[in-house]
Image (tube, rainbow, N blue to C red):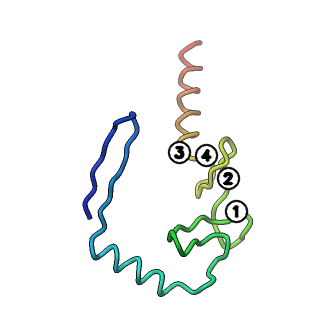
Amino acid sequence: MTIGSSAANGSRLRVVREDSDVTQWRTWLRDSTLDPWRPGEWDPETLVFSGDEHNPLTFVKRCPDCGVLITRKTYCEYCLRKHRREKLRARGSR
């Protein structure tokens, strides 16, 4: 797989050229996944699994600040860092 990056607008952009291993993996995954499997959670077209927070078989919940699905008990990584920065700023202003 070939990966390149660009920061034209300040954000990272990943350009991926698939090799035969990735193509074979995707083919195998599509062929080996029961249809339907975990409806509303598994997208067989994009091969993306997004857990359903209301399904007891899925260990995800929503970040209390931004609502993104997470697998941890507190906040998503972005909000966790934001809270840490705010806490440090609050300590520094005392």
Which residue extends farthest top? 94
Task: Kindly identify the amino acid type of the residue bearing the numbered disc 1.
Answer: Glu
Question: Percent position (x, y) of residue 21?
Answer: 29, 76
Task: Kindly identify the amino acid type of the residue bearing the numbered disc 2.
Answer: Arg
Question: Percent position (x, y) of residue 28?
Answer: 41, 84
Q: Which residue is mark 3?
A: 77
How far apart are the two marked residues, 2 and 1, measured between alpha carbons? Answer: 7 Å
Answer with mark 4 or mark 2, whichever residue precedes in sequence.
Answer: 2
Question: Percent position (x, y) of residue 66?
Answer: 65, 43
- Is 25 left or right of 79, judged from the image as shown? left
How far apart are the two marked residues, 1 and 4, measured between alpha carbons? Answer: 14 Å
Labels 2 and 1 touching (C-beta < 8 A): yes
Q: Which mark is residue 75?
A: 4
Labels 3 and 4 touching (C-beta < 8 A): yes
Answer with mark 3 or mark 1, whichever residue precedes in sequence.
Answer: 1
Labels 1 and 4 touching (C-beta < 8 A): no
Rate crowding at label 4 as few (under 14), some (14 to 19) or many (20 or more) other CA atoms within 10 Å: many
**Helix, strand or loop status at disc 3:** helix
Rate crowding at label 1 as few (under 14), some (14 to 19) or many (20 or more) other CA atoms within 10 Å: some
Q: Which label lies toward us, 1 or 4?
A: 1
Q: Which mark is residue 62?
A: 2
Q: Which mark is residue 53?
A: 1
